Amino acid sequence: MPEPGEGPPAQQSQWKGVVSRRLADLKLAPAREAEIVEEWAEHLEDRYRELLAGGAAEPEAREAVLGDLSNPTALIQELRKVENPITTEPLVPGASGKENMMADFGQDLRYALRMLRKNPGFTFVAVLTLALGIGANTAIFSVLDAVLLRPLPYPEPQQLVKLWSRFTGIGLPNDQNDVSAPEFRDFQQLNQSFTGIAAINTGTFNIGVKGSPERVVGATVSPSLFAILGAQASLGRTFLPEEAQPGHDQEVILSYGLWRRAFGGDPHVIGTTLRVDAVPYTVVGVMPAGFDYPQDTEIWGPLSFSPDDLSPNSRGNHGLEVLARIKPELTLAQVRTDMDRIGKTIIEQNRSNYPYEKYGFGIILNPLLEETVGDVKTSLWVLMAAVALVLLIACANVANLLLVRASGRQQETAIRVALGAGPGRLARQLLTESTLLALIGGLAGLALTPWTLHGLVALSGTALPRVVDTRINLWALAFTLAVSLLTGILFGLAPALQAWRAGHYDLLKGGRSTHGGGSNRLRRALVMGEAALSLILLAGAGLLLRSFIQILKVNPGFRPEGVLTMRISLPDATYGKPEQIRGFYRELLDRVQRLPGVEAAGAINLLPLGGSNFSGTATIDSQSVPPEDTTPEVDYRAVTPGFFKAMGVSLVRGRYFEERDSEMAQPVTIVDETLAQTYWPNQDPIGRRLHLGDGKSTMPWMTVIGVVRHVRNRTLEARSRVEVYWPQAQQPRGFMALVIRTPGNPMSLATTVRKEVAVLDPELPAYQVRTMTEVMGESVARRRLALVLLAVFSGLAVVLAAVGIYGVASYSVVQRQQEIGLRMALGARRNQVLGLVIGQGMSLTLAGLGVGLVAALGLTRLMGSLLFAVRPADPLALGGATLLLAAVALLAVFIPARRASQVDPIVALRYE
Amino acid sequence: MQPIDLRLFDRELKKGSAELLILSLVEARPRHGYEISKLIEQRSAGALRFQVASLYPLLYRLEKRGWIQGRWVEKAGQRRRRYYRLTVQGRDVLVSQRRGWQTFVQAVNAITAAQGRDHA
C-alpha cells in the first residue's frame, strides 16, 4: 500500500471506499479491483487537494470530487467494456480479459516448462512412470485393436460365419466337431440362409521349388470360398465351379508370398506346372498379398468329393471346416433357426445310417470374428484391464509426487494469490502443468511402444491370432493421446483441487498456511488405493501362475524330456503303394535307431499336443455297456513299434507293437487304459476286439494286444477321448512324425537324422523339427503369454506402489522431524521411533491391502475361464500376493523409518 | 467557459479523437491519469474535461490494445502513481491517427470555410 502523502489530511481511504462501492457490481478480481481503486483514489485525492488549494472549503471540495463519480451506471458500462468479471482473473496485474485466455495459456505453458526443467529429478521420475503406464496401455491396446476390434479384412465381415457339427457327449470342446463331406452337401442343399457356403480341408504339401523340396501349408477349398470372402486373384483367376469335380481338380492357386519366393514374382506363371506332392498341377491364379484364409495358407487347390466321400459310410468322417456368408437381410438368430431345422432333417434322413440322434446332433454357427479371436478375448480384456490398473497406479503416484511438490510450493502459491491469482486461475495453471507432464509421458510412452509391441508380438508368437497385423495405428495413437490427456487431468486434479481450497484459505489468512491436513489425507488415500490396485493385479498374476504350475504338473501320459520330433510327408505320387511307405519308414527308423546317442526311435501320424487330431467312430466288442454305447468317438493314431518306448508312454498290460505285427499278421491294436476300464471293466482286455467305423462297417476286427497309459492328445488341461492305436505297418500313412529319444540334448541329433532322411530320399523335406518339450510348450503358449504379461504388469504395479509408499513415508518423516527430534530428546529410543514410523506407514498399506483383497475376490472371478485347477478365491494366490505386497511395503517404509530414527535430536530441534 | 456538451463529446470519444488526445499527451513522457486529465483541461482552456469514469476506462482500453503501458512508480516523498507511457505500437497508431485527424480537420475546415464564403 502507498505511503501516506504529504500535506493536508489525506482522504484516500474515504475515496477508496467510495470507488470500491461503485465497482462492486463489476465483480472484478480482487487484485484488479484493488489496483483500480488505488489509481482512482489517487486521482480524486489530487483533484481534492487542487480544489482546496484553489480556496474551496473541505465539504465543498469533497462534494465536487464525488460529483465525478455521480453516474455509477455509465461508469460501470464503460468499465465493463474493458474489464472482466472474476471468472477469469488475471494472473498478472493489468493483463485481463477474454482475449487473454490464450495468452494465459501460453504463459501457463511456459511457466510449466520452466517448472519441469527446474526439477529434473521429479520430472524424470514422473515422466518415466507415466511413459511405462501409457506405453504399456498403447501396446496392449494396439494388440487388442488388431486382434479383437479391427474387422476381418473382408467385405461385410459380419455376414461371415463358420459352421460346425454338434456331437454331444463325446468329449469335444463345446461339443463342436468338424463337418463330414455328406453333412456339408446336406448343409449346401438344405439351407435357406446363405449366399455361399464353402468347405475347406487344410493340410501341408511338398512342392518342388527350384530343385529344393519345400513343405508348405495348403488347403483344398470349394471354389465358392473366394466369392464368399470377396477375394479376387491378383493374377489369373480363382477356381471355377466345375473344378470341384473329381478329375477336374488339377489346378492350384498360389499365395503372393509363395509366388514371389518360388517363382520370383514371374508374371507369366499362369499356366505353368507345379509339382505338389509329386503330382503336376497347373497354376491358374495368384492371390493378392493380404489374402490369408485359412491362416498361413500358401497354396490352394479345388476340393472335390468322390462318390465314396459322399456315401453314408463317410458321415462319420469329420474333417472339414465350413465357412458361409449369410444373406444380408437375415439375423444370426434367424439363421440359427434355419440350422436347427437342417439338423433335424439330417437326423431324420439318416436314422438308419448314422447315430445322429444319440449324439444330439445339431449345427453350431459362430460369427467368423468370434471364431478367430474367441479364445483369447477374455485374456486380452483381462490384460487391458490390468494395464489400465497399472496406469491408474502410475497416475496415483504422479499425483502423489505433485502433491508433495505442491506443499513445497506453498510460499509460491501464497505470493500468487496475493498478486491476484484466484483459485480457479491457480488450478488451471496446475492442470496445465500436469497435462503437459502427461503429454510428455505419453510421447515417451509412444517412443517405447515400438519396442514393447515388438516384444509382445515376439512373445506371443503364434499364441494370438492376427497378432502379426499389429502395428501402432492411428487409433492407437489417438488412444494414447486421449489416455495421456485423461491421465494429466486425473492426476492433476488432486493438487489443483487442493490449490483451489488452499487459495481461499490463504486469501483469508493472508499468510503461510498449513494445508497439510487435507493433502496428507489425500496422499494417504492415494497410497491406499495403489496398494489395493496392486494387490488386485498381483492376485490375478498369482492365480495365472498357480494355474500354469498346475498345468505343468499334469501328467501328459508320456515323458517329453529328451525327445526330438520332426515331420515327414511322403508324396502319393512316388510312394503310392503301401509297401513303399512301410519300406521307407522301416528303413529310416532302422538307420536312426543305429545312430549314436539314440535310445529309441519311432513314428506316429499325429503327435500328442501337436495341434491336429483325428477321431472317428469305433465299434467295441463289449458286453459291459449298453449296445448303443459300444460305438464311441475315439482318437486314433497309427504308430511304429518303437513309438511308445521313444515317447515314454508306459505299458499297463500286454505288450507294445513289434515287427511281427506286420501287414501279414492278424490286425492288432493297443488301447489306452480309459478305454479298457470303460468297456472291459474288471476283465482282461488282452484278446478283446474292436474295429473302426460303426456297427455296420466292414472294417476288420482288431485284437487288443496291449494297454497303455492315457495320453493327453488335445490339450494338457483336459483328458482326451479314449484312444486306439494300430501298427503303422497294417495301415500305412505317408504322413508321420518321427519321435527319437536320446539321453543327451535332443536338438543335437537333428542334423544327423535329417541326413539319414536325405540318404533315403534327397527330395524329401524333414520339417517342424522340435523337441517334444517345445511341442508341449506351444500347446500352452497362450496361457504362458497371459501369465508373463500379467506378471510383468503386476511387477510394474508393485514397484510403482512401493515408490508411492516410500514417498509418503519419507515425506511424513521430513514433516515430523521436529516432533521426532523432540521425542528423542525426551528419551524415546531409536527402536521406538522406528516402530512409530513403520507402524504409521504399514497401517496405511494394510488398510489398502484389505480393500484390495475384497476387490480382488470380486474381480478375479471374471478370470474364471483362464484358470486351471485353481479357484478364483485361491487362498495361496491371494495370500501370497498380500504377503508379497506387505513385504515390499515394509521395505519401502523401513528406509525412511531408519532415516528418522537416526535423526540427531539437536539438529532436528534447531530447525525451529 | 462551459464544458462542451458531454453527449457530443462522447461521440467524439468514439470517433477516436479522445484516443488521439491521450496518445499525444503521453508521447513526450510517461504521465499519470490525473496529469493527463489536467493537461487536457488546461490545454483546451477548460473546453474539454475528462471525468474519472470516462478517462480511466479509455486508458485501460488503450493499454489492453497495447498502445500504452501503465506502470506503478514510487518516487521518494511522493505517493505511488500509475504512469502510462506510449509503446512502440502506440507510436505508430499516434502517427497515423494524427495524420487522419489533420486530414479530417482540413476537410472540415475547407467545407465550413467555403460555406462561410457562400454566405458572405
Image (tube, coloured by chain):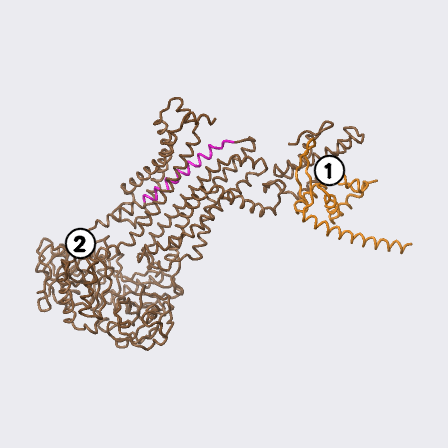
Chain colours: A brown, B orange
Mark number displayed over residue B34: 1
Q: Are marks 1 and 2 on the same chain?
A: no
Residue A559 — which label?
A: 2
Residue A528 belongs to the span the image colors magenta: yes
**Does the magenta run of residues contain A134?**
no
Q: Are marks 1 and 2 in contact (CB under 8 Å)?
A: no
Total numbered labels placed on residues in the image: 2
Which structural element holds mark 2? loop
Numbered disc 1: secondary structure: helix
Amino acid, disc 1: Tyr
**Label 1, label 2: how far apart the Cα atoms are:** 102 Å
Q: Where is residue A880? Give x, y as percent.
A: 29, 40
Please name the residue shown 55% across and 31% down the image.
A511
Q: Which residues are magenta?
A: A513-539
**Disc 1 residue crowd, few under 14, some 14–19, many 20+, Cα 10 Å:** many
| Above or below, A33 relative to A831 | below
Asked whether residue A644 appears in the rendered view, the answer is no
Q: Split into 4 quadrants, where in the image is the N terminus of chain A? A: top right
